[in-house]
Image (cartoon, grey):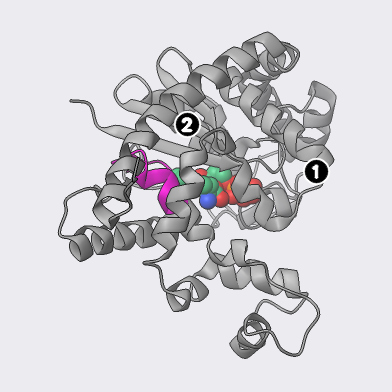
Amino acid sequence: MKETVLSGIRATGNLHLGNYYGALSKFVRMQDDYDSLFFIADLHALTTHPDPKTLHSNVKNILAEYLAAGIDPDKATIFVQSDVPEVSELYLLLNMHVGIGELMRTASFKDKARKQLGIKVDAAEGDIEREIIGTNSNKRVNAGLLTYPTLMAVDILIQKAHKVPVGKDQEQHLELTRRFARRFNSYYGVDLFPEPENFNFGDHAVKVPGLDGSGKMGKSEGNCIYLIDDEKTLRKKVMRAVTDEGPKEPNQPVSEPVNNLLTLMELTSAPEVVQHYRDAYANCSIRYGDLKKQLAEDILKVTLPIRERILDIQNDDALLARVTRQGAERARERAAKTLAEVREIMGIRKFY
Ligand code: ADP
Ligand code: TRP
């Protein structure tokens, strides 16, 4: 039997090259070899209070982007999280076995909670604790944010997934998922949930850098190339990317901003092109204008065909309805089976 792979992306905007190389392109490669489920996490998006007017269009964007990037609804189950109500019920049940302490110690919680309270990321832990027990503040951290990892664990466990392709930032959530699975299995003396692992092709997770000289490409960093960017926008972003003053002497180490551009090139350009620019840096003949033009060209070769397909698919309401209905049916069937097992194990039975 094929192993099950499951992953999701929160519905918070458009997908960028980081999402593409870190997550989406892995999904596309995995769908041939695994029993695959890919979904759009709209309930998780609620933890940061999106504008109700834009939530649905964000779900639609990501759905179109999944399909445009090559996830095939005949090979993989593609669905929207909120279309599977079984997830919400299991979320309630699993929470009975999750400690508020372990949730409060999660890095993503601390980070987002501080943002919701409007306090500095390195502010004292006590500020969050005081708020959670309900004193001293009219700002609040919502309980959904605290239980974010329970919901993510349920997404995974309800489908009994073995492999979960995600970027490095999600590894702590995956560790909690394994802990919750182990805890449930041992508390009830059952062997219900497999313990899921991350998945990468090759030996390490890719980290796609941004165009601003340091760090990773990310929505909140404002340094993204989006799959949906048109030619002009994309070229402009690449031409404005941060570089350095140029190498001063032969064979000096490559600076971080230039190395970031070369890393992007490694993802999108032919190996001999990357080598050409590495050599040019080493012998001080590099011209950043040429490097950027080449990089923009090569990124466009990847993104433009995807962009065209996104625009087509976004307008095809019948296709989107068909894919999500079929995905929801398949995902619900599996989820309902797991939920029935959990209810039975926990002693929830009917009189009729
Ligand atoms: P963002 O950081 O832009 O908000 P998300 O947190 O929604 O993106 O990430 C969705 C998926 O894409 C996750 O699996 C995440 O690990 C991956 N991802 C996001 N940014 C990058 C990046 N710069 N490099 C590699 N993977 C990334
Ligand atoms: N937390 C993930 C992120 O921010 C999204 C997500 C929700 C997810 N549920 C999941 C990823 C289940 C993998 C499996 O990117």
**Residue placed at 17% from the left, 50% from the top?**
191
Kindly check if marks 1 and 2 are in contact, taking CB atoms under 8 A apart as contact: no
Residue 102: which quarter of the image? bottom left
* Numbered mark located on residue 38 in the image: 2
Question: Is residue 314 placed above or below 335 in the rendered structure?
Answer: above
**Crowd rating for badge 1 (residues with CA inside 10 Å; few <14, some 14–19, many 20+):** few
Amino acid at the residue labelled 2: Phe
Q: Position of residue 72 (x, y in %)?
A: 48, 15
**Crowd rating for badge 2 (residues with CA inside 10 Å; few <14, some 14–19, many 20+):** many
Q: Position of residue 94 (x, y in %)?
A: 39, 58
Amino acid at the residue labelled 1: Pro
Q: Quadrant of the C terminus?
A: top left
Q: Position of residue 96 (x, y in %)?
A: 40, 66
Residue 208 visible to the viewer:
no
Q: Which residues are magenta?
A: 152-167
**Residue placed at 21% from the left, 57% from the top?**
185
Please tell me whether residue 55 belongs to the stretch shown in magenta. Answer: no
Q: Quadrant of the N terminus?
A: top left
Of all residues, the one furthest to the front in this rendering is: 352
Secondary structure category for the residue under label 1: helix
**Residue placed at 68% from the left, 51% from the top?**
46
**Residue placed at 22% from the left, 65% from the top?**
187
Left or right side of 294 for 323? left
Question: Is residue 209 placed above or below 115 in the rendered structure?
Answer: above
Decide which of 8, 198 is in the foreground and name it.
8
Total tally of numbered discs in the picture: 2
**Residue receiving disc 1:** 52
Decide which of 35, 26 is in the foreground and name it.
35
Q: Position of residue 304 (x, y in %)?
A: 69, 18
User: Residues under labels 1 and 2: Cα distance?
Assistant: 23 Å
